[in-house]
Amino acid sequence: MLKRFFLIAAVLTTLATSCRMGNQNASETTDTTSISTAAPDSAAAAATADAPSFANPVLPGDFPDPSVTKVGNTYWATATSSEWAPLFPLLRSEDLVHWETVGHVFPKGMPKWADANFWAPEISYENGKVYIYYTAHKKGGNLCVGVASADRPEGPYTDHGPLVCQEVGSIDGFPVRDEKGDLYLVWKEDGNSRNLPTPIWGQRMNEARTALTGEKFELFRNDPKTWEGRLVEGPALVRRGDYFYLFYAGDACCGTGCTYAQGVARSRSLQGPWEKYAGNPILKGQAGWKCPGHGTVVTGPGDKSYFLYHAYSTDSFVYAGRQGILSELTWNAEGWPVFPPQALAQRAATEGKDLDVTEEFTTDSLARSWQWPVGQQPKFTVQAAGNGLITLTSRPEKIGTVLGQRTKTEAYAATAAINPASISGNEAAGLAAVGDLNNALGVWVKDGQISLWQTKGDTTRMVSQQKLPKGQTVQLRMTAAEGHQYRFAWSPDGTTWNELNADKPLDGSYLPPWDRGIRVGLLAKGPAGSDVQFDWFRLNHGK
């Protein structure tokens, strides 16, 4: 099925359960406090009438827990990286709809104190300084909320280490100033990891954002007898009139059994009492999208309030991951946020051509959309002269060195050109679909053979092999249907294709980890320090 986009007019889909919610103080001016001030929208009906139309997803591909803030006239966003580096993308937009990745919070390596689970970054701007509050797993410990800062949204960022690390884990940090102007951090205690409740906590934070002070206090926790189920998470606060509004997600965020949805609570004081809205969840799955939640409220064009959050497409589902969705929100007569009904329409496939990736390796650096497994930063050199090529250094362990791209729809085709003369001995160069280093499938050139292989856990099996003819280059092709049905072929010239499994596609339904979509890209496996060469790479969606 061709990729699906949705036209959205005056929409705000519900924040939902169990996804690390990345909502941030979206300030309207250049210097402001860490708490968002909601735009003074009056009635839902009026906003629906003149709401701008735009196509979702605005962040296609795997961008969970998106957070957004405004600096001057420019919007800045970031999102969960999980186990894919470089960590925490930095995205820039002038209109909340068209986004460009301009860098990463941690472009090289990871924070010294952390080793995994890079979730839910919250971007905040105050008094000429940008802060990123993020979740990560502490070496030898559990999940913590850390913070990094920069003088400019694009960085460079300085890490200040963890702020809070509870015994069962602390995640989803959000900064806010209370009614007196004092600075606080609000976060979730990750009790669901131990089958315990999930309180949302608050605690004073020093102005340097390097430590919490005083005693923590509870705002509220999940009610397992309601739609919230096993958890509430992803707190994101705005202030409107006399109230603080805390947007939060509930229940299971991720995977094929997700039940995520979005709720809201309000209080006149940060320390409560907090009232959960009787109309919760304010956003839940609708036509074309499921399990929405974990986002940020921001004042957008026309002084309207918008919500940037994630949801699964019902077409690509877990295979493309949780994609970035934008919806408008308004306020009803009782002062609660309202999400008007969505106006959804399927776009023509040709409108999605901007999703495609063409990498000829004719510039000195790689596009910022390339990713690799955390802790496995690849070594490579790009030869931009002539037709361009990349030399990728191999790794001997698992599936080798991986250089991947996000997938964005359920149907796509990836192709790559390899120089067989660069492959010797036990080296392999290929094209693969990767869930993680233990779960992948692909095709590679090795020992004069073109081999189709599949890795599940600790086991790798060869599915089919064909002898490689002598020649200058060989092209490899992988096509995906329904997000998980893979076919592979090779060609000596890009015209005549030799199918490797035309009659029986490989089932990649096992590939996506619980919290991530599939990446496709290049790999190099062989003795440490050995090199292979690729001439180009292309990823075309909706094919």
Image (cartoon, rainbow, N blue to C red):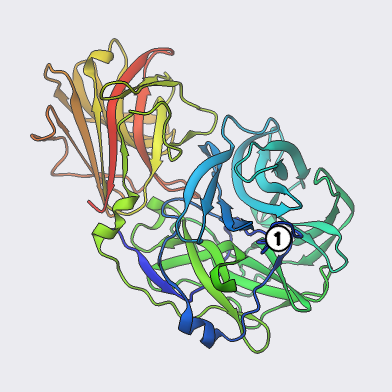
Return the x and y of residue 460 as percentages of the image width and height: 34, 29
Q: Position of residue 324 (x, y in %)?
A: 48, 58
Q: 364 and 257: which one is in front?
A: 364
- Residue at the image point whose x is 50% and y is 50% from the top: 515
> Does residue 122 appear to the left or right of 512 in the view shown?
right
Callout 1 crowding tier (Cα within 10 Å): few <14, some 14–19, many ≥20? many
Task: Say which amino acid is labelled 1.
Answer: Thr
User: Residue 9's spot in the image, x, y percent?
Assistant: 44, 75
Tell me, yes or no, if residue 304 can be seen here: no
Relative horizontal placement of residue 447, taking residue 512 as reference (left or right) = left
Residue 440 seen: yes
Q: Secondary structure at mark 1?
A: loop
Image quadrant in which you'd find residue 329: bottom right
Please determine whether, in this image, residue 298 is positioned above or below residue 132. Answer: below
Number of numbered markers: 1
Residue 472: x and y in percent read 16, 18
Give 223 or 187, whichever is nearer the viewer.
187
Q: Residue at x 25, y 59 (%)?
A: 349
Where on the picture, by quarter, is residue 498?
top left
Q: Residue furthest bottom?
A: 333
Tell whether 523 sits left or right of 379. Answer: left
Above or below, 436 relative to 419: below
Which residue appears at 17% of the width and 44% of the height? 504
Name the residue at 30% across, 24% down.
388
Report which residue position mark 1 lands on: 198
Q: Nearer the viewer, residue 187 or 540?
A: 540
